[in-house]
Image (cartoon, rainbow, N blue to C red):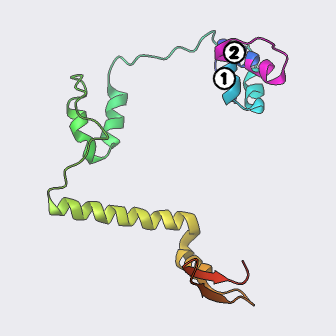
């Protein structure tokens, strides 16, 4: 990854020198960054050319709230209470707030979504043959015998 500013390139140059052992007494910030960065990543940042890079990357402050509005419109309907009070600096509604499922329709909808997501996760992990993967895991291999071990309280294979 290339550096986005000259300041970042210089900083990552110091981090890379620390990782190599060339810099003997780094500042605490450099030492902390060196501890959490891989040597190859630091080298990628440090090797960026200075030409056409700004001295420091400045984040633009939005004059209007259109970008934030777009993000909030795509947010789940559960968080719409945040969108109403967004421009009023109201921080009482939290995303991690506990949701009251007093309505049985809402509870059923939530359970259906959870079931659907669980199925999708299994398909992501094993592909469209997730049922076959579960069957294959339980199937005996050639020459394998399973017996119930009372001390362990489970079935044990002779192959293990």
Indicate the position of residue 153 as horizontal and vertical percent values: 54, 79
Asked if residue 13 is positioned above or below residue 117 in the image, the reply reads above
Q: Are marks 1 and 2 in contact (CB under 8 Å)?
A: yes
Q: Which residue is rendered at x = 81% and y = 14% of the image?
A: 23
Q: 158 or 50, which lies in front?
A: 158
Q: 22 or 70, which lies in front?
A: 22
Q: Which residue is rendered at x = 16% and y = 63% of the image?
A: 104
Q: Secondary structure at mark 2?
A: helix
Magenta stretch bounds: 15-30
Q: Which residue is rendered at x = 63% and y = 12% of the image?
A: 54
The quarter of the picture where residue 105 lies is bottom left
Gap between marks 1 and 2, in whole Å? 9 Å
Q: 58 or 152, which lies in front?
A: 152
Task: Tell whether position 122 is magenta.
Answer: no
Task: Tell whether position 24 is magenta.
Answer: yes
103 to the left or right of 23? left
The quarter of the picture where residue 17 lies is top right
Asked if residue 70 is positioned above or below residue 137 in the image, the reply reads above
Of mark 1 and mark 2, the one earlier in the sequence is 2
Indicate the position of residue 6 as horizontal and vertical percent values: 68, 13
The residue most toward the top is: 55
Indicate the position of residue 13 as horizontal and vertical percent values: 76, 17
Residue 8 visible (yes or no): no
The residue wearing badge 2 is: 11
Q: Secondary structure at mark 1?
A: helix
Report the disc number at residue 33.
1
97 to the left or right of 129? left
Residue 92 visible (yes or no): yes
The quarter of the picture where residue 134 lies is bottom right
Asked if residue 136 is positioned above or below residue 107 in the image, the reply reads below
């Amino acid at each position: 990854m290339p550096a986005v500013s000259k300041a970042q390139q210089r900083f990552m140059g110091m981090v890379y020198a620390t990782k190599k052992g060339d810099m003997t007494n780094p500042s605490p910030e450099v030492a902390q960054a060196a501890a959490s960065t891989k040597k190859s990543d630091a080298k990628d940042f440090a090797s960026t050319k200075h030409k056409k890079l700004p001295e420091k990357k400045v984040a633009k402050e939005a004059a209007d709230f259109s970008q934030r509005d777009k993000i909030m419109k795509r947010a789940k309907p559960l968080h719409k209470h945040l969108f109403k009070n967004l421009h009023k600096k109201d921080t009482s509604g939290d995303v991690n707030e506990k949701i009251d499922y007093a309505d049985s329709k809402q509870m059923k909808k939530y359970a259906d979504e959870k079931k659907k997501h669980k199925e999708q996760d299994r398909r992501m992990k094993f592909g469209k043959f997730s049922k076959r993967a579960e069957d294959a895991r339980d199937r005996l291999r050639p020459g394998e015998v399973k017996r119930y071990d009372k001390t362990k309280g489970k079935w044990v294979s002779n192959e293990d």
